[in-house]
């Protein structure tokens, strides 16, 4: 299973833990609320749903009333299918929520993990946040070193782009520092959150939608510079 498909499965299970929904509703929630899934299609969603059903983590139910089903049949339309999380699916999702390995710190996976922090225990949140901060601090150090090496060879626009990338990472590190400080102090995450991140209660399990992390996409990494 690819990393991206694993993130999609995680997000689907998390959304269906909140409430059952059909494919269109799922795609809308993923597309409009969590930036990493803005460009994905039904051709990506439905094979993933089929896999989750085959694994026993979801079940398919008719989303139509008897009258709606008859109308759909007469009109030659497919009956609406609603996907519901099974007990095994809930258990699997909770197992995924407890994982704090390196994948949880990567850009796309971290955004999905943060979206469901309201359903995650405080100690796991702390490990993920600290791991993400460490990963970004390493990235920032490499970016600064690369910029120092290549500054004289860069034109003004390329230099400005690299500075922008560094500033994005620095902003997210500051944001993570604030979150970590709040977690250590035992404070819930409520009210305005930096960079347009959605509000979320960190202990109640209620999510105010999937957040977009303003600093989660740091831009070009000059440590990848291949100039000789």
Image: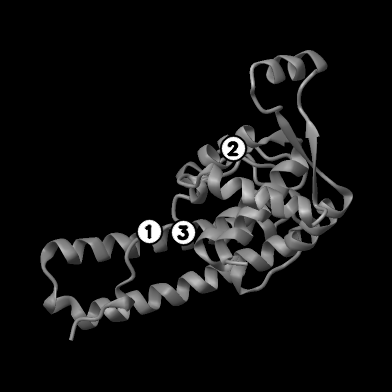
Q: Dividing the picture into quarters, in which one does residue 180 lie?
A: bottom right
Q: Is residue 145 left or right of residue 1?
A: left
Q: Which label number is shown at residue 168?
A: 1
Label 3 Cα crowd, 10 Å radius (few <14 / some 14-19 / many 20+):
many
* Residue ID at (63%, 38%): 26
On the image, the x and y values in percent for residue 205 come to 76, 44
* Residue ID at (82%, 17%): 66
User: In the rendered structure, which disc, 3 or 2, sits on the residue that comes first in sequence?
Assistant: 2
- Quadrant occupied by the C terminus: bottom left
On the image, the x and y values in percent for residue 116 come to 68, 50
**Residue at the disc numbered 3:** 172
On the image, the x and y values in percent for residue 42 come to 55, 42
Asked if marks 3 and 2 touch (Cβ < 8 Å), the reply is no
Task: Pick whichever, 183 or 104, lies toward us.
Answer: 104
- Quadrant occupied by the N terminus: bottom right
Task: Pick whichever, 113 or 138, lies toward us.
Answer: 113
**Residue at the disc numbered 2:** 29
On the image, the x and y values in percent for residue 106 come to 53, 66
Mark 1: secondary structure: helix
From this viewpoint, is residue 78 visible?
Answer: yes
């Amino acid at each position: 299973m690819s990393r991206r498909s694993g993130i999609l499965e995680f997000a689907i299970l998390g959304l269906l833990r909140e409430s059952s929904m059909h494919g269109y509703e799922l795609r809308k929630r993923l597309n409009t609320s969590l930036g990493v899934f803005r460009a994905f299609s039904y051709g990506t969603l439905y094979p993933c749903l089929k896999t989750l059903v085959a694994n026993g983590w979801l079940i398919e139910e008719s989303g139509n009333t008897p009258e709606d089903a008859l109308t759909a049949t007469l009109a030659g339309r497919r009956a609406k299918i609603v996907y519901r999380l099974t007990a095994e699916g809930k258990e699997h999702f909770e197992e995924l929520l407890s994982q704090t390995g390196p994948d949880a710190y990567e850009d796309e996976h971290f955004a999905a993990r943060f979206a469901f922090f309201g359903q995650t225990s405080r100690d796991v949140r702390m490990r993920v946040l600290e791991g993400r901060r460490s990963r970004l601090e390493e990235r920032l150090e490499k970016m600064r070193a690369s910029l120092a090496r290549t500054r004289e060879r860069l034109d003004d626009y390329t230099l400005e782009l690299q500075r922008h990338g560094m500033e994005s990472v620095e902003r997210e590190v500051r944001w993570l520092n604030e979150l970590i400080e709040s977690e250590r102090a035992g404070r819930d995450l409520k009210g305005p959150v930096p960079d347009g991140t959605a509000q979320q209660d960190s202990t109640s399990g209620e999510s105010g939608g999937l957040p977009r992390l303003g600093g989660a996409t740091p831009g070009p990494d000059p440590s990848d510079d291949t100039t000789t």
